[in-house]
Every structure is written in C-alpha cells, then in structure tokens.
Image (cartoon, rainbow, N blue to C red):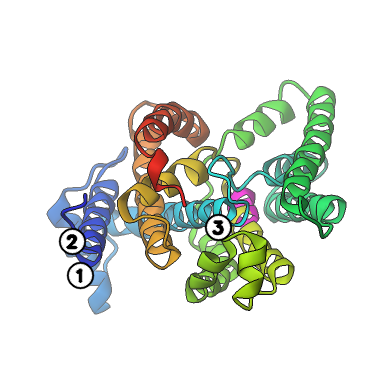
C-alpha cells in the first residue's frame, strides 16, 4: 500500500465500505436486488411514501443493523488504537482493564434478576465502568512503572469479575437463563433497532468526536513520560482522560452487543501497517477499517447459515490468523 497517498487510501477505504454496505443491505433471508435497494433509498431520501416490503425490511432491520455494525466496529477499533498508544504496548486490547469481565457480570446479573431489556444494557455498561474504575483506583498511582501497575491491576480486577460471572452462571437455570447468558457473552447485533441505535449513537458519538479532535495529543503521549512532560503534556491527567474516553466507547459497545474480541487488537495493527504510527492518520484509517470489518463479519454471521452465528466466534476465527500474519510482517511499524 506504499504506492497510495493518504487521501487516495482513505478514498479507497471509504469506497470499499460503501460497497460492503450495499452488499449487506441486499443479503439476508429476504434478498433484495441492488437496484431495488438504491431505488428504495432514493425514495426514502426524497420523502416519497411507500409501504413496500423492501422498504420495511431496510428501515426496520437492515439499515439500523448496518449503522450499528459500522459504529460498534469503529468504536472498538479506535478504542483499541488509543489503548495501545497509551500503554505503549501492541498487545493491549480495549478489554485490558476488565471491561469485558465487568460487562459480562453486569449482563448476567440483569438476565438473572430482571426481564432484560434496557436493564441489560445499563447493568453491562455500569459494571464495565465500575471494573475500570476499580483498576484505576488499584493501580493508578504515580511512579515510574504506573502503566505496568495499571495493566496488572486490570488483570486482577478482570479475574475477580470473571470469577463472579462464573458463580452467576453456576447458579443460573440451565434450561432458560444460562443459554441466554452464554449467547450474550459471544456477541451479537441481533438487538440492533432504531431506538437502541439512537441511544447508542447519542452516547458514543460525542466521545468519538472528542477523540478525533485531539488525536494528535496521542502522538505526544506515545513518547516516554519524561519526553512528553518536556513537551508540555500533563501526562497523568491526559492519560486518564484518554483512558476514560476509550473506556466509554468500549463499555457502551459491549453493553449493546456483547463481547466481540480481537477487533480492537487486530484492526489497529492493520491500520498501523498502512499509514504508520502517526495518530492523525492512524485513527481515521482505524475507524473506517473497523466499521467495514465488523460489517463484513456481521453479514457473514447472519447469512452463512440458517441460524445466526455469534460474532465472537467469527472474529476469533478470522482475527487470530490475521493477527499472527501481521505480527510476522509488521514488527517494524510499531512506534
């Protein structure tokens, strides 16, 4: 990809994403021809009333799901790039501070003791944020090895919530509640509806915009603390601010669609191979790649079998070999 300038690369990625969106809108249990999709979208854009089956399917099911895929993929990938920069470690994922374990415990708690619905989202998000808060309180002390201590604290807190989640699963009804908990933990966009999408976008878009606006500050924080301080950066305050934003993006994503692993680990590596470690270019490429990647995965998940395959299974099957390949070819592009 070295023959492509950055603007041409972004144009190529955005064009590819639009093509994937069109394919995703066409495929499903009710196939729709590409020209019908484009005609229906044009009618919707012009405000022409229509009660066709194609418009109902697109409005109620596929377009919200496509939008949710793009936004969740972008948020998890950008969150992963941010974490990897802040911890100066290419093996860090958005779940390093216990987000997935906390969200899993919160969701299981909601499934066991409530009727689900919005309580599931609220509990998953609340306990994910709580897990990160405990990790920061336990390991967020100033000092030469504060970043390492923070990572170790995240592992400890994550282990505690994983044990609590196992306890809830052990006590759950094996015929009704336990399958629901297991399915949620494997990740799915089956709950993508216009109202859920609206709340999710309202919550995460401002955080994503803030991260986009100040992405150049991540270049400064990627330096050793002494160099960053000499450049006028308040290292601890800004690192905690960016960790908070990245945590918000990852926690909200896990709350609405379950645990989707590998995305926040693989996509930033792939983007770094394309444009290097400059976050002014890295974050936009990561954002577009992450959205397109999850949209492809979700389309495969809902179209490749008579039942919907959980997203976590596909991202693991695809992400692990891709990550191994990237590690072999991309050692020189990290920092």
Q: Can see residue 121?
A: yes
Quote the CA–CA distance across marks 3 and 2: 36 Å
Alpha carbon distance from label 1 to label 2: 6 Å
Q: Secondary structure at mark 3?
A: helix
Are the two marked residues, 3 and 1, in contact with CB atoms closer than 8 angstroms?
A: no
Sort mark 2 into few (<14), some (14-19) or many (20+) by Cα contacts within 10 Å.
some
The residue that label 3 is drawn on is: 82
Q: Is residue 308 left or right of residue 254?
A: left
In depth, the one of 100 and 242 nearer the eye is 242
Secondary structure character of the magenta stretch overall: helix
Q: Nearer the viewer, residue 167 or 43?
A: 167
| Residue placed most toward the observer, 187 or 78 | 78
Seen from the viewer's position, the closer of residues 167 and 227 is 227
Could you say which disc has been placed on residue 42 in the image?
A: 1
Q: Earlier in the sequence, mark 3 or mark 2?
A: 2
For the record, the magenta segment spans: 251-256
Q: Position of residue 277 (x, y in %)?
A: 42, 56
Secondary element at image label 1: helix
CB within 8 Å, label 3 to label 2: no
Determine contact: label 1, label 2, CB under 8 Å: yes
In the image, which disc is placed on residue 38?
A: 2
* Numbered disc in front, either 3 or 2: 3
């Amino acid at each position: 990809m070295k023959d492509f300038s950055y603007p041409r690369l972004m144009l190529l990625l955005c064009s590819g994403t639009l093509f994937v969106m069109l394919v995703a809108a066409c495929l499903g249990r009710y196939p729709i021809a590409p020209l019908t999709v484009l005609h229906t979208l044009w009618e919707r854009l012009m405000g022409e009333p229509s009660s066709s089956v194609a418009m109902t399917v697109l409005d109620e099911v596929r377009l919200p799901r496509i939008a949710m895929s793009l936004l969740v993929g972008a948020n998890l990938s950008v969150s992963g790039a941010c974490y990897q920069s802040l911890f100066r470690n290419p093996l860090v994922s958005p779940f390093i501070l216990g987000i997935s374990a906390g969200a899993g415990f919160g969701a299981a708690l909601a499934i066991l003791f409530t009727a689900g619905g919005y309580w599931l989202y609220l509990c998953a998000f609340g306990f994910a944020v709580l897990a990160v808060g405990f990790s920061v309180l336990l390991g967020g002390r100033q000092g030469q090895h504060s970043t390492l201590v923070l990572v170790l604290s995240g592992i400890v807190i994550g282990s505690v919530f994983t044990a609590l989640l196992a306890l809830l699963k052990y006590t759950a009804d094996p015929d009704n509640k336990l399958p629901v908990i297991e399915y949620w933990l494997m990740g799915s966009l089956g709950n993508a509806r216009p109202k859920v999408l609206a709340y999710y976008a309202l919550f995460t878009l401002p955080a994503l915009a803030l991260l986009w606006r100040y992405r150049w500050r991540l270049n400064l924080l990627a330096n050793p603390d002494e160099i960053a301080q000499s450049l006028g950066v308040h290292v601890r305050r800004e690192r905690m601010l960016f960790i908070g934003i990245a945590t918000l993006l990852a926690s909200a994503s896990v709350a609405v669609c379950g645990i989707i692993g590998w995305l926040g680990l693989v996509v930033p590596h792939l983007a770094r191979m394309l444009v290097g470690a400059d976050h002014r270019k890295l974050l936009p490429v990561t954002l577009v790649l992450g959205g397109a990647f999850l949209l492809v995965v979700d389309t495969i998940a809902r179209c490749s079998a008579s039942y919907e395959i959980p997203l976590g299974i596909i991202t693991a099957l695809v992400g692990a070999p891709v990550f191994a390949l990237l590690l072999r070819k991309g050692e020189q592009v990290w920092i």
